Image: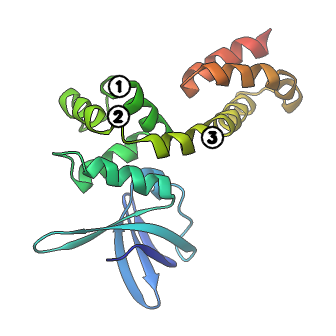
Amino acid sequence: MIYLLRGAIACKEIGTVVIDVNGVGYGVTVPLSTYYDLGAVGEEVELKIHTSQRENSIELFGFLTEAEKKLFEKLISVSGIGPKAATNVLSNISVSELVRCIINGDLAQRKIRGIGTRTATKIVNELKDKLDDLAADEKSSIPNTMLNDTISALLNLGYTRAEVEKKTPEIKKIIEVSSSIENVLRDSLKVIRN
């Protein structure tokens, strides 16, 4: 079993990367969340690996974070969800948002391509009580990530850093009561315009 690969990125295409480890190229399937955070070809990278063995093949699935790998492994434990479907889910929704949707039971409303209402309901039913460790990890990192994302979005919309910093305490309060970046940004725009 391969649990970790550290080496240079030999080539990358959407959803796949080849890692050169001392002259041996390992083809690794990655979700888009990992793919977009990888460096350029030639840069060093370390991926947490899940090895999937079937009768005729061995496939490697790679992740930049341990949380992503853990959630992937929990997803494939759900009957009817294979590694490709789990990779698709992680390509369409962040770890923190997926954990939140599963715990709240509203994954079916997210409309993830390739995952129907029945499958989404099955994921919720089978994983709802098995995500305590991930929920605790994500809960502690969500506020800072959401604050950084909101500030970045406001700056990109043309507000000055001084305007944004002046309203940061109010934005933090919005983040405490909101669960999605869309709602936080909408409410933050209302605050910053006043």
Using the image as rendered, state which of residue 55 and residue 105 is in the foreground: 105
Which of the marked residues, 1 or 3, is nearer the chain's N terminus? 1
**Crowd tier of the residue under label 2, counting other residues whose Cα lies within 10 Å: few below 14, some 14–19, many 20 or above:** some
Residue at 39 percent of width and 47 percent of height: 91
Could you say where residue 3 lies in the image, as x and y percent from the top left? Answer: 40, 73
Identify which amino acid the numbered label 1 is placed on: Gly
**Residue drawn at (35%, 52%), measured in percent from left and top?**
72
| Residue depth check, mark 1 versus mark 2: number of the one nearer the observer | 2
Say which amino acid is labelled 2.
Answer: Lys
Secondary structure at badge 3 equals: helix
Q: Secondary structure at mark 1?
A: loop
Q: Position of residue 95 (x, y in %)?
A: 46, 43
Classify mark 3: residues with Cα within 10 Å, few (<14), some (14-19) or many (20+).
few
The answer, for residue 185, to whether it is visible in the render is no
Question: How far from the left and from the top, in percent, is residue 13?
Answer: 39, 63
Task: List the single residue furthest toward the top.
Answer: 194
What residue would you read off at disc 2? 128
Tell whether label 2 touches label 1 (CB within 8 Å). Answer: yes
The numbered dot on residue 140 is 3
Q: Is residue 21 above or below residue 182?
A: below
Amino acid type of disc 3?
Ser
Residue tagged 1: 105
- With respect to residue 22, does 28 lie above or below? above
Q: What is the distance, in whole Å, between disc 1 and disc 2 at their CAs? A: 8 Å
